[in-house]
Amino acid sequence: MDTPRALLKKSIFPSLLVLFLATLPFYMPPYTPLAVTSILMYIVLTVSWAMFCGPTRYISLATATFFGVGMYTSAVLGERLPLPLVVACGSLVSFLIGLLTGFICLRLRGFYFAIFTFGLNELVRNFVLWWEGRVAHTVGRWVVLVDSLTIYYYMLVIVLLTVLVAFFISRSRYGLILLSIGEAEEAAAHIGINVTRYRIFFFALSCLFMGMAGAVMATKWAYIDPRIAFNPVLNFTPVLMALFGGVGNVFGPILGAGVLTLASEILLSRFPYYYMLLYGILFIVIISFLPDGLVGLSRRWRENPLIS
Amino acid sequence: MSIKLIFDVAITGLIMGGIYALIAMGLNLQYGVARVLNVSHGEFVMVGAFITYFAHVLFGINPLLSLVLCGPMLFIIGLFMYRTLFQYLRRSSQSLDMFEGRSMLASFGLLYVIQNIALLWWGPNVKAYAYLSYPIRFLGLTFEANRLVALLFTLVLILVFYLFVVYSKAGKAIRAAAQNEKSAQLLGINVPAVLGFCFGLGTLLAGVAGSIVSMMQEITPLMGFPYLIIAMIVLVLGGAGNILGSLLGGLILGGVTTVVMYVEPGLSLVVSYVIFALILLIRPEGVLGR
Amino acid sequence: MGILEGDKVTKFFGGLAAVFDVDFDINKGEIVGLIGPNGAGKTTLFNMISGSLSTTGGEIRYRGKRISNLKPYQICKLGIARTFQSVKLFANISVFDHVFLGSICGTESRTKTADAQRKAATLLEMVGLSARKSDLARNLPLAEQKRLEVARALSTEPQVLLLDEVMAGLTATELTSFTTLIREIRNEGTTILLVEHVMQAIMDISDRIIVLHHGVKIAEGLPREIVTNKRVIEVYLGTDAYAEHQQP
C-alpha cells in the first residue's frame, strides 16, 4: 500500500486531466463536449464492467441491459423529478435488478454465466417491447430534454465517481477478495470468503454505475425505444475496450475505452458505410493479438526493454 | 378451437422445432466438441437462406436442390473459419477457459463482419420468393405445400444427421472427441481434424436450416440473431455436448414457442428465456446433460 | 468426545458409494493419518468435512456441533482449514497476500489490516517463505507452493488442519523439513488429519492411522499395528513395509 506522499504524487497527472476536462467547454468549440461525452460514457461502462468482471474473470454480457434500465427510468421519471433524483433512481433500480440477476446466477460458472447474461438482454428487450406495445401503447419514449453542457458535467462527475470507487476497491481487501475469487474460487471459499455474497454485491455495484450512466445519456439521445436502449452492441463493446486496455488495474479500461472510442469516432466519420464491418474486424484482431491489452503490452515492454 | 387450428399449430410447431433442432445441433457440435461458443451461428442461417434465395431467383434452381448446394458450401466456409481463426486462438490460449472466452468474443466480431457484408452486398430490405405456395388438400384440410415439404425435409435431415452421429465411424469419432480429447487422441483419432470437421458440420446444419426457412418466410440480413438466441437456449436445455438433447430440446422449444405465438405473439422469446432461466437454475447441466 | 467426529458418514455418487458408513473420532492435538489405495474415498471424505461436498448420509461433528452440509466458508470460520490434492493457489497473487487474505477472511470477527499483516508475516516466517513474500504464487517451485498452501490454511487460525497429499512430489530433503513443519504445527496446538501416499512419512508422523478401501474403513490403530494388519497388507502395503516394521 502506498504512503500518502506517493499517492499524492501519483494523483498529479489524473488531477490535471480532470481539471482540463472540467474547463474544456470554456476554450473548445461547442461540439467538443458533445464528442467527449460519448467517450465518458464508454469509460463509465468499461470501468464498471471491469470493476467486477476484471478480477473475478466472469464475463458479463449484460451491460446494455443495466444501461437500458437506467435509460428507461429516466424516460419514465424525467418529467416528474429533478435530474439528480432521476439519476439516483436510475442507479438504484439498476442496482436492485443487478442484485436479483446476481442472485439468480448464483450457481452458474463461466460459460453459463456468460450465456445467461447474454440472453438476459434479449429477454429484457423483448419484454419491454411487448409491455410498451401492449400495456403502455407506445413504441418509444421521449425523454425530458437537458442541455448538452449539463449532460457533459453530469457524465464527468459520474466518471469520477466510478473511477474512484473502482480504484479504491481494487486497492482494498475487497479487491484482493474479488481477485481470489477469479483465481481459485473453491480455495477462496475455503479460507472463509462468502463467495456468493461478494459476487452478488459487487456485480450489482457495477450495474449501479451502468444505470447511472444510462439515466443521463437518455436525456442526450432524447428518444429511446427498446432497440436503442438495450442495444446488444453495448454488451460487447465495453468488454472489448476493457480487454484492449487490459483488466489488471483501473487505468487499463480507461485507456481502452478512450482509445477505442476515439478510433471509432474517426472510423465513423471516414467510412460511414463500412464502419460496422471494420468494427467487427477490429474486434477479431484485438482478441487475437492483444490478449493482455495495452497495459499488458507496456508491462511486457518494461520487463523486456529493447534497449537495456 | 377448430381442428384446422390444432393442425396448424402442430405442423408449425414441428417445423419450427425441427429448424431449431437443426440449428441447435449445429451449435452443439461447435461448442460441445470444438469448444467454440459461436455467437455468429445465426448469421450462417442467414447466409444459407440467402444462397437459396439467389439460387432460386437468379438461376431458377429448385430450393430443395439448393439444400445440396448450400450444405457443402457452408461446410467449407465453416471449416475455413475454424482453420484460420479458431484454431489459431486455440493454440495461442493458455487454458481451455481462456480459449472459450476468447473464441466467443472473436465470434462476436465475426457476427458483425458477416452481417455487415450481407447488409452492404444485399441491402437491408426484406426479400422473399414464392415456392410451392399453392395449397394442398390433406385429410380434408388445406395446407400450403411448401410448409409440408419443409416439414418433411426437416425431419429427414434430422434423421439422417442423427443416424450419422450415432452409427457412423465419423460420428463415433466425434462423440469420442467430445467426451475426452486426450483419450480420443490416444485411440488414434485425429482430434484437430475432427474439431474442424465438427465446426464445419455445424455451419452446414445452420445453412441448411436457413435454406428451409427461406422457403416459408421472408429473409433479411438481420434475421440470424433470434435464431442464435434460441439455439443457445436449446443448447443449455439439452446439455452441451449432448446431440440428442439438442434434438429433443429444439423440438420441445419449437412446440412451446409456437403455442405461445398463437396466444400472445410478442412473448414467445420471453417464455423461452424464462424456461431457459429456470433450467439453468434447477439443473445447469441441462435436462439431459452429461 | 473428540474435536472432530464422524458418524456413519456416507456419500453416494449416483449408484456408486464413494464413502460408506465411515466412523471416526479425532482427539484434540492428535496427528491422524488417513491412507488407502487410489479411489478409496479419502479426498471425498475430506471434501465432506470441509464442506465442498454434501453428505448423503451420516453426520460430521466439530466440537460437538453438527457441521455436515454447512458451506465451506462457514466451516473455515468455525476452525477447520485444508489444503488440496492439486495445489489451488491464487496464481497471480503474491505470497504475502495469500496469507494476509486468510488472516482477514478466515476468522469469525473482523480483523484489522495491521493485525492481519503482522500475523501474515509471522506465519511466513514459520513456513520459511519470508524471503519470497512479494513473489507471485505461480512463480514458486512446487515444494514452496505446498508450504504456501499450508501457510494460507494456517492463517485462518484453524483448530483442525486437513492436509491432502501435501507431501506428494517432494524430494527427500523437502520431505524431512515438511515433516518437521507438521510437527511444529501440532505443537502449537492444532489437530491434524492428513492423507498421504508417502508411507514412510505418514507412518513416522502419525499418532494413529485410519485405513479406507473402496469407501469403507477397514482398519484403525497405531502405525505399527496397521503395518502388521493382515487385511491392510493384502489390500495396500505390500510386503516391504511389512518386513521393515518387523525388524526390532
Image (cartoon, rainbow, N blue to C red):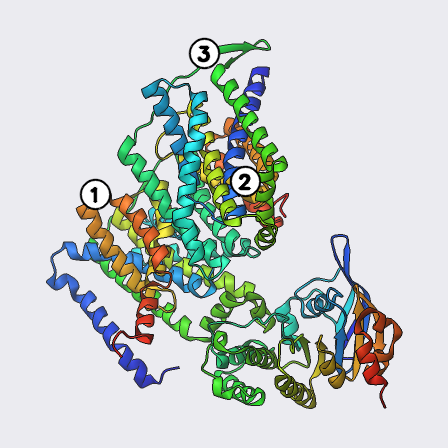
User: Which residue does the image show at 36% across and 55% down from the upper left?
Assistant: A288
CA distance separating discs 1 and 2: 37 Å
Dot 3 crowding, Cα within 10 Å, few <14, some 14–19, many 20+: few
Q: According to the image, label 3 marks what residue?
A: B134
Left or right of A209? Residue B263 is: right
- Looking at marks 3 and 2 on the same chain, the residue that comes earlier in the sequence is marked by 3
Q: Is residue A110 left or right of residue B223?
A: right
Asked whether the beta carbons under mark 3 and mark 1 sit within 8 Å of each other, the answer is: no
Mark 2 nearby-residue class (10 Å; few <14, some 14–19, many ≥20): many
Q: Position of residue B276 (x, y in %)?
A: 55, 43
Farthest residue toward the front?
B188
Q: Amino acid at mark 2?
A: Val
Q: Amino acid at mark 3?
A: Tyr
In the rendered view, tell whether residue A149 sits above or below residue B118: below
- Count every numbered label the image shows and give the total: 3
Residue B126 location in percent, x, y?
A: 33, 27
Q: In the rendered image, which residue does mark 2 sit on?
A: B234
Q: Amino acid at mark 1?
A: Pro
Near-viewer residue (C160 or A21): C160
The quadrant holding residue B77 is: top left
- Residue A62 lies, in percent from the top left, at 42, 51
In the rendered structure, the answer to whether residue C150 lies left or right of residue C2 reads: left
Q: Looking at the picture, tell me which residue is in the foreground, A207 or A305.
A: A305
Separation of residues labelled 3 and 2 (CA atoms): 33 Å
* Residue B27 visible, this angle: yes
Query: Residue A51 placed where, x, y %?
Result: 40, 64
Question: The numbered mark 1 sits on a residue in which chain?
Answer: A
Residue at 34% x, 43% y is: B112
